[in-house]
Image (spheres, coloured by chain):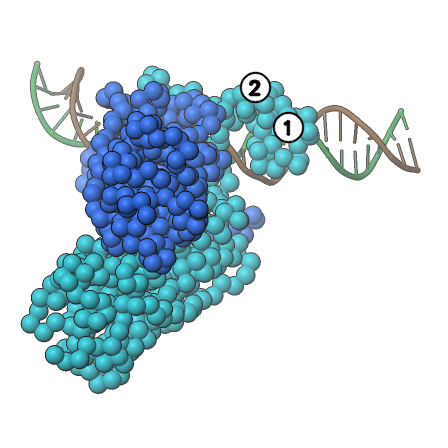
Chain colours: A blue, B cyan, C brown, D green
Amino acid sequence: MSAETDRSKAGIPKLADVARQAGVSTATVSRCLNDPSVVSERTRQKVMKAVERLGYAPNFGAQALAAKRTNTFGAIIPTMENAIFARGLQAFQEELGAHRTTLLVASSSYRPDLEEEQIRALVARGADALLLIGYDRTEATYEFLRQRNMPFVVSWAFDAGHSATTVGFDNRQAMQTLAAQVIDLGHRRLALISAERRDNDRARERVAGVLAAMADTGLAPDDLTIVEVPYSIENGSSAFAQLMARADPPTAVLCGNDVLAAGALTQAKAMGLSVPDDVSITGFDDIELAQIVDPPLTTVHVPHRDMGREAARTLIAARNGTEKVSSLKLQTQLVWRQSLGPAPKTG
Amino acid sequence: MSAETDRSKAGIPKLADVARQAGVSTATVSRCLNDPSVVSERTRQKVMKAVERLGYAPNFGAQALAAKRTNTFGAIIPTMENAIFARGLQAFQEELGAHRTTLLVASSSYRPDLEEEQIRALVARGADALLLIGYDRTEATYEFLRQRNMPFVVSWAFDAGHSATTVGFDNRQAMQTLAAQVIDLGHRRLALISAERRDNDRARERVAGVLAAMADTGLAPDDLTIVEVPYSIENGSSAFAQLMARADPPTAVLCGNDVLAAGALTQAKAMGLSVPDDVSITGFDDIELAQIVDPPLTTVHVPHRDMGREAARTLIAARNGTEKVSSLKLQTQLVWRQSLGPAPKTG
DNA sequence: TTACAGTATGTAAGCGCTTACATAGACACA
DNA sequence: TGTGTCTATGTAAGCGCTTACATACTGTAA
C-alpha cells in the first residue's frame, strides 16, 4: 500500500528486472556492468539490450552499500559566490575526472558548524576522500575524520607545524612579502581590509604577514588600521570609504583578496581619488578580476590550478593507499601591476 | 580477509554498535535519530551518549536504501569557472537549506554527454529533484528523467512551447530589447561575441534576439559579424581584437555575457580605443563584474536570485507532490550604464 | 574414455539501515 | 483483580546491489 503511494519511486527498474528481462541471474547483470570482460559476448549483448530497454541505472546507495566504495570525492569550500575557489576547484575536478572519480561540492558559508555538517553529509554519502580549505575547524571535526580514516587534504594554506596533509601556500609569507614592498615604497600609514579573522586562518595569517613586515622595519602595529568585512566587492567599497574618512587616512590600503580590492578601487574612483597617485591599493589571489579593473591590481599570485591538481593527485594516492602521501608547499608570487605606487609626498 | 585489508572502512561504527553500546535495539537507535519524540528521555540520553562516544554517523547509502528518500537535490551547471551561475545557485541553496534539503552541485563543462553522466550520477545517488540549465539535451536524457519520474526544472531560459517545467527568462526577448537600443543609437555595423551555440540554447536565443532586432529595422543579417568563443575574459579580449582588425570594424560589439564583455573592454583599452566614443560594448547577465569594469557595462539584468529561489520552491513543491507545479517566466531588465553610446559619426 | 583445466553462469549471503508489527509494562477504571 | 489503553521497546523483513563460492559446461590431453 505505502509502496503504491510512493509516487516518486514507482516503477524504477532494478537489477533483478534486467536479469529477468535478459533471462540471466542478477550476478551476471552485475558483472556485465562492472567487469564485462568476464561475461560472454552473447550474454552481454542480451543484458545490455535489457538495460537499454528498461532504462536501468544502478541504485547508488545499494551499490555503495554492497561494494563499500563510491569513486566520489567531496570538496567543501567556504563560498561559491565569487571566483576565489573556482579555478582551483576546476583543476581539482579535471584531475579527478581523469581518474574516473566524481566530485561533489558543498559550501559552508565560512561557518565551521555548517562545514562540519557538510563534512558529515559527504562522509555519510560515502565520499572516498575530502578536500578542505584551511585549518580552522573544531577538534571534534578532525577527530571525526581521523576516526573514519577518511583521507583529506587541507588546501589554500600551509602550516608546516600542522599534522594534516596540506597542499597549499604560506599566506603569511605571501602577504609579508607584499607588505614589505609597500613599506619599501615609502608608505607609513597602512590600512588593511581583511576578511573576518574568526574561523579563518588564511585571513589571520595574512594580517600577521602585514604586521610582520611592519615589525621588520620598525613600524608599530598601531600604524595599521584594520577593517574586517566579509568578502564582497561592495564590502570592499564601503570599507575603503570608511578608511578614507578617518582623520589620518592611509596612503596604502592592502586588501585581503582581489574582490575586496576591486571594491576599494571602484570606491576610490567614485571619490575622485587617483590610484596609485593618491592612494595605493593591493589585492591577493590574482583572480581574473585583478587584471581587468582599472588600474590592474598589484597582487599576490596564488597557483590555483596547480594547487587543485596537486591536491587531487595527493588525495587519489591516499585513497589508493599505494603511495605515502605528503604535504606540498607551493610558491606564491608577487605580481606587479599598476595599483601600487610610491607613497605620495607628505602634503 | 579482504575485509581486513579494507583500510579505509575499518572500524566504522554502525547502528548496531551504538545499539549494543547503549543496551537497546537498533530500532530504538534509529528512532532516536529520526524521530526522537517517540523515545523516552532516559533512553535517548543513553543512545546519544553512545552515538557521541562512538562518533557514529549514519551510512547514507543504507539509509537511502531503506528509507527511499534522501532530502538531497542536485544541480548541474555548465561551469563553475566564472560567476555566471553563482548568485542564482546560492539563492537556490539558501532556499533549500530553509527546507532541510541538501544541495549537490556538479558541472558539465557545457557538454551534453557529461551533463547526462552527471544527471545519472545524481539520480543514482538518490537526488529527489534536479535543477538543470537550459533546454539543450538529448531526448534520451529527457526520457530517462521522465521514466524515473524525477522532478526537475529548467532554468536560465524560457520557452513557452517546451514541455519541461521552467523557471527562467526569455533570452531572445532580452537580447532583442538591448539590440534594438543599440540600433536606435545609430549603430549599423554590429558584431556579436557569442558563446558557442552548439548545445547551448541560451546562446542561440541571444543571437536570434540580435537578428530579430535587426530585422525589425530592415538591417540585413549580413550586417552582423558573429564570433563564437567559450565564455572567458581572455576569449572576450581576443575575439574583440579579431573583430576590430577587420576591414570594416563594427561600431558596436554586443557580447553574449558580461565576462566576454569585460574581456572586450580590456582589449579596447589596450588598443587605445575609447568606449563608448570609438566603439560601444554591451554585456548580458549583470553580474558584479559589470559594475566594476571601466566604463561600467550597459547590460541585461537577469534576476539571478529570484530565479534560484523560485526554482527551489518549484522543485520542493514538486517533490512534496502536494501542489501542482507550473512554469514561471521572470523579467529581465535593461541596465543603462556607460559602455553603450551613440554610433560615432561616419569618418 | 577419463580426468582436469578453464570458462561462463547461478546461488545466496550479506552490506547498514528503516519500519510494520509484536510485545511488554504501566496505569486507570470498573 | 481483571481489562483495556497507552507508551516504550524489540523483532525481523526487506531495500537493491556485489561477490565468494558452487555448479555446469567445453575442450584437451593422457
B138 vs D21: above or below: below
Under circle 1, the secondary element is helix
Mark earlier in primary sequence (2, 1): 2
Res B182 seen here: yes
Q: Where is residue A92 in the image (x, y as percent from the top left)?
A: 26, 38
Question: Mark 2–mark 1 contact, CB under 8 Å?
Answer: no
- Which amino acid type is marked by label 1? Arg
Disc 1 is attached to a residue of which chain? B
Compared to residue B69, the image places residue A146 above or below, namely: above
Q: Nearer the viewer, residue B271 or D1?
A: B271
Q: Which of A193 and B112 is in front in this view?
A: A193
**Residue that carries the numbered disc 2 in the rendered image:** B21
Regarding mark 2 in the picture, which secondary structure is present there?
helix
Q: Quadrant of residue B199?
A: bottom left
From the viewer's perspective, is A308 left or right of B92? Answer: left
**x%, y% of residue A189?**
36, 39
**Residue drawn 18% across and 73% down?**
B251
In the foreground, B212 or B246: B246
**Residue A62, image x, y percentages:** 40, 37
Residue B147 is drawn in which quadrant? bottom left
The chain letter under disc 2 is B
Q: Mark 1 points at which residue?
A: B44
Q: On screen, A140 above or below B250?
A: above
Q: How far across and how far down the image is residue A260, in percent?
A: 36, 47
| Residue ID at (61%, 20%) | B23
